Image (cartoon, helix red, strand yellow):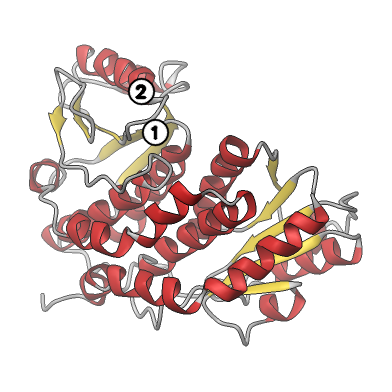
Amino acid sequence: MTETHMRREVLEIPDAVERLLTHGGDAIRGAAEALRARDPAFFVTVARGSSDHAATYFKYVAEILAGLPVASVGPSVASIYGARLKVKGAACLAVSQSGMSPDIVAMVRMMQEEGALTVGLTNHLDSRLAEVSDHALALHAGPELSVAATKTFVNSAIAGVWLLAELVQDDLLRAAIHGLPQALADAVAADWSPLAAELQTTDSLYCLGRGPVFAFSNEAALKFKETCQLHAESYSSAEVLHGPVSIVERGFPVIALAVQDAAQSALIDVAEQVAAKGAKVFTTSRKATTATALPAVRTGHPLTDPISLIASFYAMVEQVAVARGVNPDAPRHLRKVTETT
């Protein structure tokens, strides 16, 4: 197979992030200023698929960094059931790479009508989502030809965390965000081949995370399904021992995504317990004693470290897909834009 679009787009991630940092600052700072003026008591997020994983990351960062509760709402509440939500004075973050999904647009429009300040993250400022958002923030990811979202997901995650860094005016986090292009260039070149080799013949695996990195565990599991036709499930390390561990048998692959934050010890403790039950565990932490360590590029802040992990993961999962004989650019039954009503 010739070089895939997915491979080229993964390698373009550092440049796509540089474009966002160069061209997206004024819009993000403007939205942050509007949020400070509104002083919302809570956020509501609206998204699906990979975009929803970016929204989950936003949730954890907002709650940890800004003390703002974040709830994810089902778009069908507005588009199918026609319900109205009491969101006056709140803020809404909608994430859609295409900006074209009718249910996302319907939810954002309803929230705006009910008095929420709406912010839309999209790669297309000419989209319906941009039209109905009080503040439309361009992702500046450039064209993405592979069905599997990579650089658009990364830029969605960064735009969300950057918005929060500007909201609370956190200089350390802002510095880490502006250092991401170099960190991500290192991350996409990281050697995760031991994991890639393990997954060429497996049928199922678990992805584990905790805190902000749990959102990226969700994204990893989705990418295994859509690019490799490989069954993968994501669990918080706080939940996996509550039932899912029952299907673990000797050699069962488990990926424990970890960063150097307050959740690392708890996550690694669970990973060690799963390894003791026979699982073949791979982790991005060197604190584990029974797992295979994967290189993790640090970004200068624990809240941005998960972004480098997903960049390394994308480079690896594309290799797994090709090795399994699957074209990651055109997964069966899928298309680039899914417009859900």
Q: What residue is at 25 percent from the left and 77 percent from the top? A: 5
**Viewer-nearest residue: 29 or 252:** 29
Horizontal and vertical percent position of residue 340 = 64, 67
Task: Return the x and y of residue 15 as percentages of the image width and height.
Answer: 30, 74
- Give the Cα separation between the discs numbered 1 and 2: 7 Å
Eyeballing the image, is 178 above or below 169? below
Q: Report the front residue among 324 and 36.
A: 36
Name the residue rendered at 20%, 59% in the picture: 188
Can residue 101 be seen in this snapshot? yes
Q: Which residue is mark 1?
A: 209
Residue topped by disc 2: 267
Q: Secondary structure at mark 1?
A: strand
Asked whether the residues under the numbered discs 1 and 2 touch, taking CB atoms below 8 Å apart as contact, a structural biologist would say yes
Assign a secondary structure to mark 2: helix
- Would residue 47 appear left or right of 106 to someone viewing this image? left
Identify the amino acid type marked 1: Gly
